[in-house]
Amino acid sequence: MRAVQVSRLEGPGALEVVDVDEPVAGPEQVLIDVESAGVVFPDLLLSRGEYQMRPETPFVLGSEVAGTVRTAPQGSGFSPGDRVAAMCVLGGFAEAVVAPVDQTFPLPGSVSADVGAGLPMNYLTAHFVLGQRGRLVAGETVLVHGAAGGVGVACIQFAKARGATVVAVVSTEGKAEVARAAGADHAVLVTDAEGTGFKDATLALTDGAGVDIVVDPVGGDRFTDSLRSLRRGGRLLVVGFTAGEIPTVKVNRLLLRNTEVIGAAWGEWAWGNPGFMRGQWDEIVDDVAAGRLAPPISATYPLAQTAAAVGELAERRVTGKVVVHPQE
């Protein structure tokens, strides 16, 4: 079968489409014919050897897929022909892939394969970040950094599905439109043309009170103003550091306003708790079926152009979900 292989850790430009043997499913694995494969930030890092998981080269890239079950273990709940999404971690940019049973999820009939392929990583992350670690309840106000990115859009949609008000923080007016289309009630720039920062804009929107939750996958120099954007008793959720710099916090800030800084590493939690992902899926699947949780598809690529698809993330041009079609 055709697959996209990493043989040199030199980034997207080094990705190669090669012929490899089809994977063989183990006793707790589902064999899936891949219709769509989502492109996620860890794919870019894996292609450079910069991810915390470092598989031995050569390996087939691709973390999340949607397609049709070819074979499944007896008692798994899956049968040949079932439409599924899956978190396969590796091997997704290929015509077929295997995934663990508990990381394979039934895909509602109303949901396209492209949308399904964009759900596992970002939307289970949003569920963990806001639903579990953030303890989000209806009526709260959530500020989302990086709001036009994959995790940002997922957090906007999840927060809205749970009855929250959302303030999206973005770097351009174009990205503000993406955030609003995802459901954000307000979109503010990191710094606008008049020099007003997101903190002051957020405080103005909340009559000076601040927000209940900040979702921060960016880090860097905006971290302190994120803390200042919280209301008394608010929570700042640390999701990642796409800005590159890992910020520090003076804990007296937390003491003075009874605020919290909470780590929210979905992968660390999910892979340490077998079955956790399937439980998450079961909690969001009604929202998925109803279209309340659905990544906007910004571009699709045939398998031969996977390097360009992953390259979109490297160039920070993505304002929606990029999907690869391995059968094309």
Image (spheres, rainbow, N blue to C red):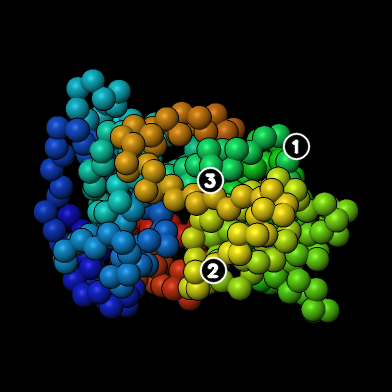
Left or right of residue 105: residue 135? right
Q: Which residue is mark 3?
A: 129
Please state which of the two labelled residues, at mark 3 or mark 2, is closer to the viewer.
Answer: 2
Please state which of the two labelled residues, at mark 2 or mark 1, is closer to the viewer.
Answer: 2
Left or right of residue 77: residue 288? right
Mark nearer the N terminus (3 vs 1)? 3
- Is residue 100 positioned above or below 89 on the image? above
Outermost top residue: 75
Cα gap from disc 3 to disc 1, whole angstroms: 17 Å
Cα gap from disc 3 to disc 2, whole angstroms: 19 Å
Q: Which residue is mark 2?
A: 247
Mark nearer the N terminus (2 vs 1)? 1
* Residue type indicated by callout 3: Val
Assign the N terminus to one quadrant of the image.
bottom left
Q: Helix, strand, or loop for circle 2?
A: loop
Assign the C terminus to one quadrant of the image.
bottom left
